[in-house]
Each structure stands twice: as structure tokens, then as C-alpha cells.
Amino acid sequence: MGPRVDVCLTRPLGACPEESGETQNPRLCPCCVRSSCALTPAAETLYSSPAHSVLQLILAMESTEVESDILRRVRTLLRELDGHRPACQCDRGMLRWTLHKKIDQNPSNSSVVVRILVKELERAERGDFRHYIIPLLHTLMYTLMQAPCIPDELWGRVYDFCKKLLTLPRPFCTIALDYAARLKVERAAPGALYQRMVISEQSLKSNLYPYQEKIFLFADPDLLSEAICQALLSDTEAAQVSQSPRACMCYVIIHAMQAALGEGCASSGLKASLQDMPMGEVEHWFQQVVAAVESAGQEGSAEHGQHTARLEEIHQAVLSSLQAGNAATGGLQGTPLPNPNISFHLWTEDEQLWKELGLFIRPGWQSCQPDCLGQELDTSGMQDILSGCECCQQSRFSVLSTDSGIERDLPLPAEESLGPCGAEPERCRLLRKGGMKKKPSALESVVFLQAGGSGAALKPPGKLQRSPGPTLGPAAQLQRLHTARVVLLGDDRVLGRLARAYHSWRKRETRRAFLTPRLNLHFYYVPVVAEQPSTWQDHPATGQEELCEVGAYLGRADPWYQSNINSLCHMIPKLATMPSSPSKHLVPDLFITDVIAYYTRMGTQPVCFQLYAVKLFFRDPAQEPAEEVFLTELRTQVQDSSSPRELSLTKKKTTLDGPGIDLTVRYRKAVLSARPKELALSLRSTGLLMKAIPAEQAEDLVCVKVTITEIIRTNNLSGRSFSAVANSLRTQHINIRSTEQRPFTVCLDKDSRRSYRNVISMEVSPCLEPSYCLQRTRTMKSTLHDTEDVGMVKYMPKSLLLPINTFAGVIQ
């Protein structure tokens, strides 16, 4: 049997007699190459001509060549997942991008790509190649969302395969359930996935789907070079140039028509008609299409035929302004998926992240008017929100209210002298709008905070360092209209800064929940290492591999993350310093922006990392202890003496006992049984290192690995000699104190900006969720049980986890 072409030239799509049972005259059909496809008498004469045979042979050869090329690209992706890296490392991560770019250039290949991916998924499921399933599934869904029209038979095969994956453990069943729900909506209302993504990402006005999304790129200018920051800024700005509400509305209209009508859609005429329309008419037809698709996607909606008939009416109405010759069908055309709304920010202030999220929810903050915050906030909440706004601070402290607080005493504005009620302006001024604002109950506040936290209810699902994201119950599935996707670019130091900001944000939300009830917050991480030495001069320069421990860990856990995201670590600096080609302004290929958009769209599975709290005590008793959090590591080193007297005493002590200082260490040993076992030891050390990110998956226990450099003194005939020995232990709670009150230096998350001097003691423990601490304090006031969690506290997440989204999450 020869090659197969998807579209039959003599019958409408899906009308092949083999599928309808008409097999009275079996014969090979040159258009769909099925041995049981019967030909009409008119087609007998057409296909018997030599010209048609040559044409069909050429089409068949081209189809075979395209299918072979796509199959080769897909197989190359799978070989990369097996560890067979390409010869050139710069090609790593571009395989998936080039595959989707090939579909964008020729949308008619979408059906071929979908058919090949479905076959590969079924083969991987039969052969138990599970590491292929999630990458292939993400590639398939991304193709389906952009495809102009897919046969219903392929939709059914993909939907059945997703249902078959529900028997597998997480994350396979989680991703399959999500995609099965999307496919169900898409089959009921073709074009719904594309439409919803464009509406939310471009913040188009729609009452039926009022969701908004935005991507925030945050880069630390102290960690990345100016060339890298400028290149990222240029790419994000170039990605937004071609985006306009009018163009996006036209894309939605054309894609919905093609998805529902197929070959019957006059794509060229529809595009020309929309271009000639004024903005008001385009918006009108956009709202009509959105209403038709959303109503069809709801449960209990009309049949598929009624939805198609409704879109056919809109299709004819839009084409009514064109001449008959311009309304030709012209075949299916690809509608590009617009780049999402991306904003680039240099992270220069600690509160900048929280401020940008607030501006996303309430754009009125830009005018710095407290009235724009809404009436649901009290005075303390508004002070917390506007704590970083200088002009609002000046208005609060410099303006003195002199009125009596009674509306009757307020002066009447000139433009309202007559008032809307004519001769009774006084009566109109006394009218009050709104009323008493009911404050949320304690139970509602707990639901908001639990939904916004990263924990997974009472007990973690295991003792792994990386844990899957929470599975929220019906009460916690809040309908938030805004989704912020925060992408961090840099090394582990920017993640340490994020951990600090996230802890501060959770504490602020515990005092007054403002963003949590309104905002879905997702974090993404793109490792980027600049070609510059380490900024902390107290220890040897940290290698580039050590600066990206979190990225390397996520790459080991998720091979698709390793192929698409970790490859940007060295690619972004190279692209930033690469000179632009003369033809770049003609055909711009925004590779970095496209990969980030793909990551934020398809990376929905969070990996939650435990944050650790550290309390530092200083040598000066008058100095208050410092409380900090860290994500990756904590490093200590012996601090040099400052005064000559201390220096002389230190030299004498070093001569007798060796280098370093005497430490007393008390810790709770981390074991699988989770039984507390308190241990203590005294030793002389030159420093220690706490690692919170395990180097191997076999060491995946929720704890920190502490490596203490101990100084061993040996007496021999030649005198005393000293040797350094590395002692390792695993713990969750540890207390370290300098016996001689000699200070040491502490550096958090490899960041010199977060280093502390003159420290003599410190305590390290898992960071607790602020909402848990608040609720536990409230519960302890009304109960006598002080040692165990009772009441509502036992159902709240206890530990503060930082979720970072990947493609697969935790593979069990």
C-alpha cells in the first residue's frame, strides 16, 4: 500500500466510504490510498487521465518526504531524551523549536505531525518507555492548540490515550487528566483552547472568559552582564511589537472558523474582510465568536452541528462585504499563536516583585491614589501595600485633614453646583454608596492562605526533597481571574533572593490577604550563567556548575526541562554577544522569547523545595538577632581578628590548638523513621557548609547535608601536626555556637550581598508557613494543648515550600 494523504480531493473531510461503510466497489483511491475506497463514475474518468496520475504521484512523493522528515525530527527528540546528545551542544534545545516552526510555516502538516506523535505515544506506552510519554504529550498538545483543523478521528485517539494514562502514577495521571479535560472542551467547541489562551495572554475584553495572564521576567543586574540584560529587553520588546488587540481578535475569529468549518472556511477572504473592517465591527464579530465557542464548550450545550451552523452564519456575515470572487475557499491557513504579554524587569529593589504583582491586579496603583485599592482594605492594609511608594508616603504624612468628617460640611464643587437632581443638590450630596464591608471570617482567611501556600495539607506526600505541588480540594479551588507567571533568570543566587522575597510576601499576606484571593502565582526558573568571576572574595571562586545546582537538579528530575531550559544556561550569553545579521530585521526569530513562552504555557507541574530558616546571634549583645531564609546553601568561615590584641591572642591559641575555632554543635539526626534523635559534639573547625539541594536522587531526603571541616591535632616526635578532616551529617534542626565567643562569617545562597559578620551562634530549622504560625497562635490561646496541633491547625501546611514549575514535576 502506498503513502496516505489526509484530504480526499473528491469528497469532503471525513466522507470516505471506508469510514461510512460504503465498500461495494473496492478500488485503490489515489487521494487517500485506501484499498476499500469506492470511486464515483466522474472520478473514474478523472483518475484515468495521465495528467492526474502524474499529479497524484508528485503529491504522494511530497507527502512521503514531509512525513519522513517529521518522523526523523521526532525520533531525534527521543534519542536526546535517552542521553544521546547532539554533536554540537548549541543545537541542544532547538529540536523542539524547529519542529514547531516547521508547522507554523506549513500548517497543512499539522495532521501529519499529530498522527506521528500519537503513534509514538502508543508505542512508548506499549514498550513501557515512560520517559518518552510526557515530552511527546506536551509536544502533541502544543501542536493541537495551533493546528487549524484536525480530523475528529485523531482527536478521539488522543483523548483515548489520555484516559489510558489515568492508571499510571503521578505525574502521568495528573497531566493526562488535565489534557483529557482540555480535549473534551476542544471536541465540543473546536478552537476553544486557542481562543482562551489568546484572550487570557493578551488581556482581551470578554465577559464570558474574563481571565488575564502576564509573564514577568526578572533578572538581577548584579548577576547578569549588561549585554545579556539588553538582549533580553530587546527580545521582549520585539515580541510585543507585532501584537495588537485588533490582530489578536482577527486570529481568534479565523482560527475558530477553520477549526469548526474545516475546508469550508474561506480563510483568505475572511482575512481580507477583517482587515478592511473598522475596529468596532471587528470587536463585534470577535464577541460573537467568543460567545458561540464558550456556549458550545459548556456542559449540556447544543450539539456540534448547531455550533457549526452558528459559526457558518457568522462566517457568511463577515464575508458579505466582499465580492464573490474574493470569497474563494483557498484552503486552510495557519493562524500564528501570538506571543504572550511579557514584561522585563531588572530586580533592583527587594519589594519590586510584590509591587509589580499589585500593579498587575490593580493598574490604578500607577496613579498612587489610595482610593484605587478598593474599599475592602483597612488603613493598616493600605499602609502595607503602599509602603514602597514615595509619593503616597508624602501624601500621607504631609496632608492634614481639616474637615469635620461629615459630608454635609464638605464644600460643593463648582461643576456639581446644580447636581444631577436639579433643585435639590443638598439632598444628592447626602446619598451614600455602598455599605458596611463584611470582613472575611477566620475560616475564609485560612482557605485563602492555604490555597495560596505551597504545602500539601497536613502531611507531605513523602520524604523526598522535591515534592509535587498541592492537590487542592473543592473549597480551595478559588476562581482567580489573574495569573502571574514569574520567570527568574540567573543562577542560584537569584533563587535565594526569590526565597527571601517569597517568605516576606507570605508573611505580608498572612497579616492581610490581598494578592492571594485574587492572583494565581507561578514561578519558573531559567538558569543563566554570565562569564564573570564570583563576587565573594572570602572563598575560592565558585564554579559555574555549583552556581546552577537547582537547575541541574531539575534537569535530572525532568529530562524535558534539561533539553529545553537548561540548554539556555550558556546559549543566552552567546546569543547576547552574537552580532546581529543584516537580515534579522526582515525575519526575526525570537528563540529565547519563544522558548520562555513554551515553558510558561506547558510547564504546569511544580517542584516544591523546602526553605530553611536561620537565626543569627552576633558578638555585640546590643545587636538584635537576624532572621533569614535560604534555599540552596549556607557557608561559614572563621573571621579574622580586627584588633592587635585579639590577633596576638589568636596566634597563641592557633599555635597551641591549631587553626580554626572551637564549636559546639547540637543537632537532630535525620533518619527515615522520623524519630527524633538529639546528638551533640564539640570540635575545632575552620568552617562548615550546609547543602539543601541533594547532589543525587538517592540522597533525596528532606534535610540539609552539613559538612564540617574538623581540625585534628596529632602529637609526634617532631612536634604537633594538624590535619583537616571532613565530617558529614544530615539534619533538619541544628544549633552551632562558638565556645570561645570568636566570631565567624555566614554567607547565604552563595550571595555576597547576604553575608553576615561577627556571628557567634546560629540556629537552622525548616522554615514554617506564616499562616500556620498565626493560626497555631490563635489556637493556643483557646486551648491547653501547647505541644501538638489541634483543631484547624492540623489541616494546614506546616512547612514553607518554594514551588518552581517544570514540565513533569516529580516522577515517581
Image: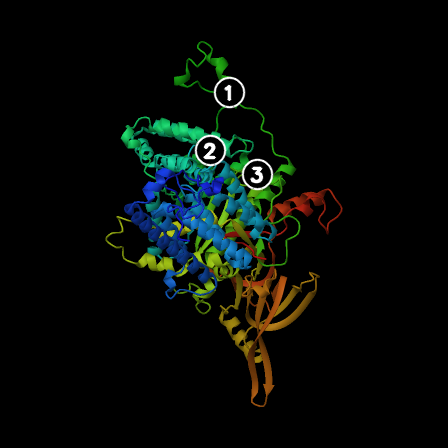
Residue at the limit of the structure toward the top, as seen here: 423
Query: Is disc 1 placed on a helix, strand or loop?
Result: helix
- Residue name at image x 57 percent, y 59 percent: 616
Disc 3 marks which amino acid? Leu
Disc 2 marks which amino acid? Val
Q: Nearer the viewer, mark 3 or mark 2?
A: 2
Q: Is residue 640 above or below residue 805?
A: below
Q: Position of residue 789 (x, y in %)?
A: 71, 49
Whether residue 388 sits left or right of residue 793 in the image: it is left
Q: Is residue 382 above or below residue 525?
A: above
Tell me the quarter of the picture where residue 11 sits. Answer: top left
Tell me the quarter of the picture where residue 660 sits. Answer: bottom right
Q: Which mark is residue 787?
A: none
Q: Is residue 656 above or below residue 259?
A: below
Q: Which mark is residue 478?
A: 3
Residue 487 visible within the image: no
